[in-house]
Image (cartoon, helix red, strand yellow):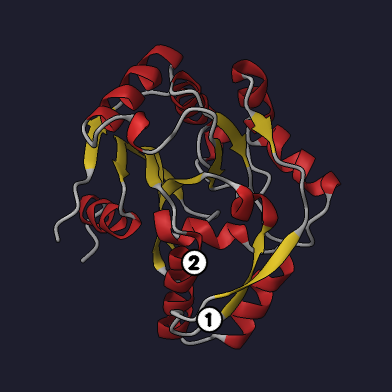
Amino acid sequence: MRKKVSVVRCSSYGRDETQAAMERVLETIGGIGRFVGKGSRVIVKPNLVMAKRPEDAVTTHPALIEALCRQIMSAGGHPVIAESPGGPLNLTLLRRVYRLTGMEEAAKNTGAELNFDLDFEDVPHPEGKVVRRARIMKCILKADAVISFSKMKTHGMMLFTGAVKNLYGTIPGLIKGEYHFNMPRIEDFSNMLVDICTLVKPSLSIMDGIVGMEGEGPSSGRPVQTGVILASECPHALDYAAAVLAGIK
């Protein structure tokens, strides 16, 4: 079955422009009310791979996180911004990541919650191809909906990183290193990423492609003005569309 991917032009991270673009990109796939119920607790999972400032084009831009949180709240939902960045996860690291990436300010401006729950839970995944059990953030498991909000980037190892790979940030930082060590073959690592995605089951996936990254992503590439926001209920379809826009076969 074909899955719809909404693509909307947006040339800057100005508040008015991002708010209008967010409304349009969601309206095309049925509106935020399709994915967020009144009173629901909604995890907003940006790409915060490390403590980088928004202008570095490494992380999801806070202006778009603000725009999405406002949409969630307009539908009666409660947005919770959550991430498990690389490295040993602790409150000091998490606070620094939230502050430098602009998430702290985005939460303050909208009334969204920042997740500081560091607990994880081992979850069975019988349908997984290479991962039959995974340790996932508890806040993800307790949420009514999960929205993957990725950054449009090429990737030194995986060629491309988008909505599916963004959910790699739902597992503990040090376990990420174990997966890299235990799955050196790209095919196995790719299947692991798909397994994590099918386990988390995001309700909606959005991508920040206003300024993306090309070259040696996820953090050492060059910022590139792409001027789009993408959204889809299917993370795989979203990544496919974004890869086509990026010129990747």
Q: Nearer the viewer, residue 215 or 205?
A: 205
Label 2 residue SS = helix
Quadrant in the picture for residue 183: bottom right
Q: Is residue 2 left or right of residue 197?
A: left
Q: Residue at x 38, y 42 (%)?
A: 206
For the C terminus, give its image quadrant: bottom left
Amino acid bearing label 2:
Leu
Q: Residue at x 49, y 23 (%)?
A: 76
Image location (x, y in percent) of residue 144: 53, 44
Determine if residue 148 is in view: yes
What residue sits right under mark 2 in the picture?
199
Q: Nearer the viewer, residue 162 or 246?
A: 162
Quadrant in the picture for residue 248: bottom left
Q: Is residue 210 left or right of residue 216?
A: left
Tags 1 and 2 touching, CB below 8 Å? yes
Amino acid bearing label 1:
Val
Q: Is residue 159 above or below residue 215?
A: below
Q: Residue at x 63, y 36 (%)?
A: 101
Q: In whole angstroms, how far apart are the C-alphas of marks 1 and 2?
A: 10 Å
What residue sits right under mark 1 in the picture?
131
Q: Is residue 12 left or right of residue 98?
A: left
Image location (x, y in percent) of residue 22: 35, 26
* Residue ranking furthest to the top: 16
